[in-house]
Amino acid sequence: MIKYIELALSIGADNAAFINPDEIVYDGRTLLKCMFGCDSWGKGCTCPSRDAYLKPWEFEPLLRKYRSVLIIHSKYKAIAQKASFAVEREAFLDGDMLAFSMSDCALCSECAGFKNEECRNIKQARPAFHSVGIDVYNTVKKLGLPLKPLREVNEEQNWYSAVWLNHPHIQVLKSQ
C-alpha cells in the first residue's frame, strides 16, 4: 500500500494518506453547495446535475463497500487528478478491479459540457468527491491536512482527490 503513496508523491502530490472508509464524513448538503455555489452547475461533464448522475445518498452505500481510501492532496487541481488516476490504474493492474478515483476534473482547458457536448475524456473523467456527498473539510481535518475557505481568489488553494481501494490498510499512513 505504501507504493500508492509513493506513486502519488512522485507525480507531484504534496501529501497522501490512507483513511478507513468509515472515517469519511458524508453529508448530502454538499449538493447544496454545488447547486448554489458553483459556476459549473448544470454544465460540467462530471457535475452531479447531469442526467443519470447518481445522487449523494446513492453513492454512499457503494463507497462504503471499499476497504480503504487514499486521500491525495496537492496545491494544483491537475496534479491531484493525475495522481489519483495513476493510483487507480496501478491498483487495477495489481488486481483491484474496482479501484475508483475521484477528483475535480482538470483534463480539458474547457469542459465539453459547457458547449453541451459529450465528455472528451470519458475513460479518465471522474466526479469530485465533494459532489457525491462527502464533506471534504471534515474528512481531511481528521488527517491533519490543510484546507480552509479562501478569503481572496489569489490565495493558495488545496485540492483533494481520493482513490477507493479494496485492499485493507494495516494502519493509517501519512506522507511527511
Image (spheres, rainbow, N blue to C red):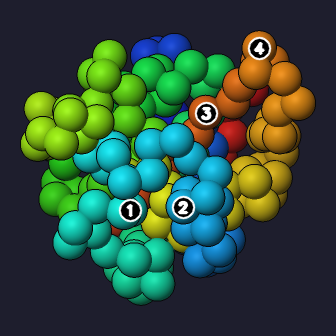
Label 4 packing within 10 angstroms: few (<14), some (14-19), many (20+): few
Secondary structure found at label 2: helix
Give the residue type at disc 2: Met
Q: Which residue is mark 3?
A: 159
Task: Say left or right for 37 vs 114.
Answer: right
Mark 3 or mark 1, which is nearer to you? 1
Q: Is residue 108 above or below residue 43?
A: above
Q: Which residue is mark 4?
A: 154
The CA span between labels 2 and 1 is 9 Å
Q: Which residue is mark 2?
A: 35
Mark 4 or mark 3, which is nearer to you? 4
Residue found 54% across the figure and 61% down from its top: 35
Task: Say left or right for 36 vs 164.
Answer: right
Residue found 76% across the figure and 21% down from its top: 153
Label 1 packing within 10 angstroms: few (<14), some (14-19), many (20+): many
Counting residues from the N terminus, which is met first, the one under dot 3 or under dot 2? 2
Quarter placement of the N terminus: top left
Counting residues from the N terminus, which is met first, the one under dot 1 or under dot 4? 1
Secondary structure found at label 4: loop
The percent coordinates of residue 169 (x first, y second) are: 52, 60
Give the residue type at disc 1: Pro
Label 1 near label 2: C-beta < 8 Å?
Answer: no
Counting residues from the N terminus, which is met first, the one under dot 4 or under dot 2? 2
